[in-house]
């Protein structure tokens, strides 16, 4: 018996959301959990791997298929950050409080700006380099970092006299 193409039923697929919001960041639902977590500012590849292992999540599973409870579990785990090993935290021995923290998202950006502002205020070498717009970590400046500079170093062409 010949089936009509329009009468065939597709197999039941799991419902996946297009966008999932984790820690105030929208992540595409088609990404793997391992890759999708790295889209959050402050979560590196190694941190994403540790989250998947400690929370018993399959790394290859799609983010769109995560349940609400699993998403809440991920966000709570990252916010508490007491089970994360100290060497994986991005703010160890905080300048003001002296404690180990792991900052995420806008908190991380704000803290970075405060740190740079403090360096500028006390006029340390790094602060002065930030103010001038030069590289801070010892890179060469002879041939790079000229994008905003109008001066050029090299041979100047002679102007022909008519």
Image (tube, rainbow, N blue to C red):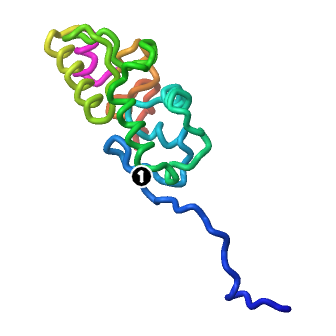
What is the x, y in percent for residue 148? Answer: 32, 34
What is the x, y in percent for residue 111? Answer: 24, 24
Task: Decide whether the magenta segment is chiefly helix, strand or loop.
Answer: helix
Q: Residue 74 magenta-drawn? A: no
Q: In which quarter of the image is the N terminus?
A: bottom right
For mark 1, what is the residue? 20
What is the x, y in percent for residue 38? Answer: 47, 37
Left or right of 101, for residue 158: right
Q: Residue 127 magenta-drawn? A: yes
Left or right of 67, for residue 23: left
Q: Give the range drawn in magenta.
A: 125-134
Query: What secondary structure is found at the residue carrying circle 1?
Result: strand
Residue under the image location 35 percent in, 45 percent down: 25
Q: Nearer the viewer, residue 155 or 17?
A: 17
Query: Residue 150, can we see it?
Result: no
Q: Indicate the quadrant where residue 81 lies.
A: top left
């Amino acid at each position: 018996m010949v089936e009509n193409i329009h009468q065939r039923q597709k197999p039941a697929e799991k419902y996946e959301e297009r966008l999932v919001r984790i820690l105030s960041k929208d992540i595409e639902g088609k990404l793997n959990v391992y890759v999708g977590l790295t889209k959050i500012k402050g979560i590196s590849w190694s941190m994403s791997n540790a989250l998947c292992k400690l929370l018993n999540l399959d790394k290859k599973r799609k983010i769109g298929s995560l349940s609400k409870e699993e998403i809440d579990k991920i966000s709570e785990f990252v916010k508490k950050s007491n089970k994360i090993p100290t060497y994986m935290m991005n703010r160890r021995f905080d300048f003001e409080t002296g404690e180990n923290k792991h900052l995420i998202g806008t908190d991380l950006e704000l803290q970075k700006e405060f740190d740079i502002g403090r360096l500028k205020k006390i006029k340390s070498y790094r602060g002065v380099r930030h103010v001038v717009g030069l590289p801070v970590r010892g890179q060469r400046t002879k041939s790079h970092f000229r994008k905003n500079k109008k001066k050029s170093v090299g041979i100047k062409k002679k102007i022909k006299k008519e």
